[in-house]
Amino acid sequence: MRWYEEGLWIGNGAAGQKDTVIAFFEKKKKRSRKQAKKLKDLFLITLSENPNELLEILPADKIDNPFTGYADDLYCLGIGYGREEAISLCQMMIEKVLADTGSVDIKTYFGKRKMNR
């Protein structure tokens, strides 16, 4: 998992969970279901790998473990508590990009060069 190094967008409901989420995905060994339950109701906002989409909202407790490689390929921009908060964060991100650049080219704005592993 790579994280937006200039400051993750964190929803109010997820504010106290940032370190738990990052620690969970930084582990290189297999994680238990008990550990995954700590992430229930938390959603990660990532850059979409699909060129036709801007962002993806993924339930943190359902993302594959690091051995599958899927989590390693994600670029996380934010964390929301509940789907509604994650959607609200996506809206704020898009509005910020639009206000700053006049376009919605999120991938360039948040660029993978600003990601940290």
Image: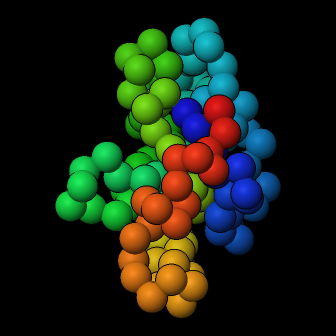
Question: Residue 112: where, in percent of width, then height?
Answer: 52, 47
Q: How does the figure colour the protein chain or chains? A: rainbow
Which quarter of the figure has residue 92? bottom right
Q: Residue at x 66, y 19 (%)?
A: 27
Q: Residue at x 46, y 39 (%)?
A: 74
Question: Residue 25: where, in percent of width, then height?
Answer: 61, 30
Compared with 99, 17 (above or below) is above
Question: Residue 66: where, in percent of width, then height?
Answer: 49, 19
Left or right relative to 66: residue 14: right
Which quarter of the figure has residue 2? top right
Compared with 13, 74 (above or below) is above
Compared with 99, 114 (above or below) is above
Left or right relative to 79: residue 15: right
Q: Residue at x 59, y 25 (%)?
A: 34
Front one among 74 and 37: 74
Q: How many numbered dots are placed on residues in this image?
A: 0
Front one among 14 and 47: 47
Question: Do we see residue 40 in this rendering?
Answer: no
- Where's the C terminus, which quadrant? top right
Front one among 67 and 43: 67
Front one among 90 and 106: 106
Which quarter of the figure has residue 116? top right
Left or right relative to 98: residue 36: right
Residue situated furthest top in the rendering: 29
Question: Do we see residue 53 in this rendering?
Answer: yes
Question: Residue 16: where, in percent of width, then height?
Answer: 78, 55
- Where's the N terminus, which quadrant? top right
